[in-house]
Amino acid sequence: MVNLTIDNRKIEAEAGRTILEVARENGIVIPTLCTHESLEPTGSCRLCVVEAKQGKRTRIVTSCLYPVAEGLTVDTKSERVMNVRRLVLQLLLARCPESAQLKEMAAEMGVGAEPRFTPDKDNVKCILCRMCVRTCEKVVGVSAIGFSYRGTEKKVCTPFQEESATCIGCGACAYICPTGHIEMETTKTGDSRTIWGRTFKMATCTVCGRYFAPEDQLKYISRTADVPLENLAVCISCR
Amino acid sequence: MTSKIKSFDELKSVQERLKAGRDPKKPCITICVGTGCLAYGTRKLVDNFREELAKRDLTGKIDFRTSGCHGFCERGPMVVISPEKIFYQRVGLADAGEIIDKTVLNGEIIDRLLYVDPQTGEKYVHEDDVPFYKKQTRLVFGQNSKVDPESMDDYLAIGGYSALGKALTGMKPEEIIQEVIKANLRGRGGGGFPAGLKWDETRKAKGEPKYVICNADEGDPGAYMDRSLLEGNPHLVLEGMIIGAYAIGSSQGYIYVRNEYPLAVKNIHIAMRQAREAGLLGENILGSGFNFDLKINRGGGAFVCGESSALFASLEGRAGEPRAKYIHATHKGLYDKPTNLNNVETWGNVPFIIEKGADWYAGIGTEGSKGTKIFSLVGKINNTGLVEVPMGTTLRKIVFEIGGGIPGGKKFKAIQTGGPSGGCIPEAHIDLPVDFDELTKIGSMMGSGGMIVMDENNCMVDVAKYFTNFLVNESCGKCVPCREGIRRMRDILVDIADGKGREGDVELLQKMAQGIIDGALCALGNSAPNPVMSTIRYFRDEYEAHIKEKRCPAGVCRALITYSIDPEKCTGCTLCAKVCPTKAAGGVKKKAHTIDPAKCTKCGACRESCKFDSIIVR
């Protein structure tokens, strides 16, 4: 255990945990756009930065990655910190002017759009938080999507932006996307869904007869979990 | 080819044998085949020399050596005739025969090939007297002209690998590290972190295997010192790495070199093969029981891969994206194993420290920065090239004494150090002693050693725009402040240059810059606002002129300038009319010409061509 101070509160915490984890456990709010409890932190949104003082050195660190240590003093709302957060939100608002989630978050933090930034017009809602890519790789385990290009051109897509042979149509990427950028369309009858340009046939529940999961996803689970496909033929509601 | 050398004593006798086989009085023609000189067509000149020697039945009787870059790239192709070290520059492809007949065989100097100082008009015969060389301290880079990069024998003949022999047979790893710490060798790649401390941390870190890496992903615009060192003297870098690996306790190393440096890749490949054959790389090096081998990894051209954690990601086969470095690479680097990464020039310094000792090394340089530093001196400078000077040498000495000043009698305005994320230093600081700490104090940085000189015709807003745009293109895109912030700064700079700047833009840029410096994930983002910050700091009046008066004082930003001709100065020579691509410039011969603003594209061709300084840009 180590002793540290966050926003003038003395806190005891387990060594090796991150500032963000410890702050949240103690009811101290630090905004984030790229963290999720089932994913390893990546430090890409930069909203969670805090000012950390260790010994004589004070610097801005990423709270989702920085491990707590004995004697650490953390300020989660210093002027330098708020300047970074304001900038990040204004930059994201200019990139994704259509995103309701961003507008809401900015309003909560009292941040308005920077008039000097011309809003992008390509209707992209992706903030490149990487949650979809990390989920697909680490949670689902298929790595059907990744990044293409670099810098301002960077985008999430399937390899070569073609239909992915490894995608199982599970939709985890769409569910985790914080801004609703990833679109998944299901037909009226529910017999198929389309995501990342590929259409997946849905399987019906042998009990209730409703469409409940892509056939490819069931086959994938059967194969990786070594469960016969027949055992996966019933939807969650009927199980 | 050398057969396996099994001990330090055997190495010494090989060196002696090679040295004895070389008569220092025998004439030798050395010709620079660094990339700069090759671009002048030097390969053909080399062929011509060989042919001319053969024609005269002199092959073998006169030594002929192709060497790596000598640094004086402005004056290539370059030929040096030993033992007198007669220096010929701007040598023509057809000059080979004449040089052999007159100079090599008869000791006659060919006047037209001599170097003439553009400032003093003085002519120089010997290489060592040329001010460009005379005022340098060419510790690391000086060997380039003494060895053929493809010949390990050349390297051994000048005592190469002695430091390795000394280290492996006479020193404990900890002693080597202490020596490097004592020498206070600081990382030449930009960070300036003490290399010895890094070695020590890596040695002490838990985890196996340990890796040593040479960062040869040099990518700053205009910088090519690491390239020239790898191309010109690959064995020096290898020797440094092997010593480092022994000190750290590593048996596997990598050289991460950009694929845009084909000659460096080729020469380092050759050097590694030779070193393996000689028992200097691989198993049981010099019979010491120490094993170490290297692999070359060619980078795909991403500037960000020069950042250590992005470099590791790239080496591991992933996209070159950095990660936060709260756990140092010395503990968790490549493949999450203890890793020591140094750049080419840092490794190149190691053999000298081991060979001559830390005390000797620490005698060069300043209190906080020891040794020499190689700079690539480019831009508005007479002597474009690579210069090596002791740390603490003033910018004035580098620019005016070694660099020969600004061409065309123009006025010095600023010098950009530290690459695209460095800063622009104004004339007020020209007497600054250049070392790691002094440069940081005034808002720039050492970086890897790029120096871009600017004169009165450079617009500082335009300069900031250029570097910022470079970084927009090179941002990896992982974090928001860098990916989104730098491009927004660039957009504002473009507006300012286009006359669309608004009141408050400068303050907004400063605020954004602070947010990006504090908020970006890696050093590329953290330092990306430096060009904007330093130009605002030292040249704010230029920003104000663009924004408030819609005027570009240097006459660069096209949206804000008009071209006209001063009728008092114009002689009607018609040259401007001839070079003008849109026929905007014209008039009657021998009478003052005019420029039609409707047709003028502000390309500047007339200004460059005018011999009477009659083109007015406002």
Image (tube, coloured by chain):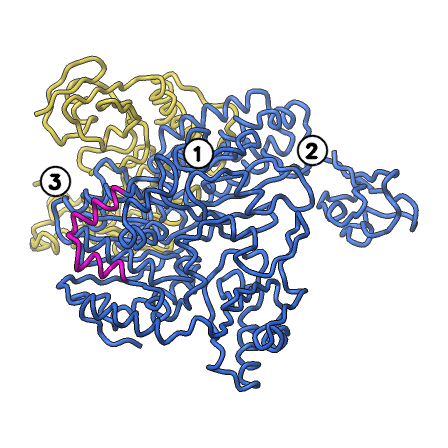
Chain colours: A yellow, B blue
Q: Is residue A15 visible?
A: yes
- Nearest to viewer (mark 2 / mark 3): 2
* Residue at figure coordinates x 22%, y 74% from the top left: B4
In the rendered image, which quarter is residue B498 located in?
top right
In the rendering, at what x and y percent does residue A226 appear?
A: 7, 55
* Residue at figure coordinates x 66%, y 51% from the top left: B118
Residue B311, above or below B272: above
Along the polypeptide, which appears first: circle 2 or circle 1? 1
Q: Are marks 2 and 3 in contact (CB under 8 Å)?
A: no
Residue matched to label 2: B560
Secondary structure under tag 1 reads helix
Residue matched to label 1: B439
In the rendered image, which quarter is residue B226 located in?
bottom left
Residue B235 placement, left or right of B508:
left
Dot 2 alpha-carbon crowd within 10 angstroms: few under 14, some 14 to 19, many 20 or more: many
Which SS type dominates the magenta stretch? helix
Q: Are marks 2 and 1 in contact (CB under 8 Å)?
A: no
Q: Is residue A198 visible?
A: no
* Residue at figure coordinates x 21%, y 55% from the top left: B245
In the rendered image, which quarter is residue B193 located in?
top left
In magenta, the rendered stretch is B162-182
In the rendering, at what x and y percent does residue B278 appear?
A: 25, 71
Q: Which mark is residue A236?
A: 3
